Amino acid sequence: MIDIDDKVLSDLRSGFSLPAKPEILQKLQVELNQEEPELGAIAKIILEDVATSAAVLKVINSPAYGMSRTVTDIKQAVMFLGVNCITQLVTGHLLKNAFNQSDCGISLERFWDNASDLSQIAMLIGRQVKPTIPVENLQLVGLFHDAGIPAMAMKYDNYAELLTKATQRPEKTLVMYEEQAYPANHTIVGYFLATSWHLPKPICQMILRHHDPEYLNGTLDPVTKATFAALKLAENLAFEAKHFRSCADWHAFRDNVMIALELSDDEYTDIKEDVEEFFIH
């Protein structure tokens, strides 16, 4: 279990320049908290931001969502997918634009490209193995689970070197290397960011504990367990496709992930081949 005490939170508040929750997300969450959120009101809030509207429509019309016809406006999108799904899509878009490259020691374009790949792989896994997992949850946790990394790169000048070390020397996880060098690791920073943006509590916990093998041993509802397992499988398969070896912590998660997703070895191999094909295209 990961314990976050008041001192850690205080240090985060004073030491990290984390992006504030955008106004459009605040408005959406206020509307969602109404007894009966109005689809029209949700659409109107999103339409106030042209870039966000365009980004949401682009994601909805991607193969990952498998829509039977092209969605051409936000009102249609809200009606087809529902307010929770749309809000999470908006959140993902806003997050990608919340960090400033000039303040960050890593390439944000490369970071978000990798995060986007991973979220698409997680959605692919969900669609093939566990269609009961809300696709928007897989997309959001895929994008957001490592959101502490850009914040760490903004805070620490040598963070890019540590990232490279963690990739080249997989005998330890990134979290282990971070804890040797810094007061906090990227999972805690990402959790703090997610909670400050008022993301759903299960998503926040997955962000906090996505390198904690004990998480899948806890008392989790089936959807949360399957969502987390799909994330970890996607994380490893994406890493294998790029680096030709497993993630540093995959051995600690593998058995529980296979059980949570009810995967056989043959099914795992089939998904792995699909992911390799994803990167070829």
Image: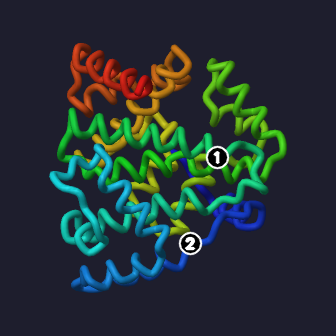
Specify the amino acid type for callout 1. Ile
Which residue is more in the foreground, 135 or 58? 58
Side (left or right) of 97 relative to 38: right
Name the element at disc 2.
loop
Name the residue at 68% across, 53% down.
151
Q: Which mark is residue 21?
A: 2
Q: Is residue 265 above or below residue 93?
A: above
Per the model, the C-alpha gap separating discs 1 and 2 is 18 Å
Q: Is residue 222 above or below residue 121?
A: below
Residue of label 1: 149
Measuring from the top left, give residue 140's x and y in whole percent: 41, 53
Residue 220 in sight from this viewpoint: no
N-terminal-most mark, 1 or 2: 2
Residue 197 in sight from this viewpoint: yes
Name the residue at 46% across, 56% down.
204
Measuring from the top left, give residue 280's x and y in whole percent: 43, 23
Side (left or right) of 77 relative to 138: left
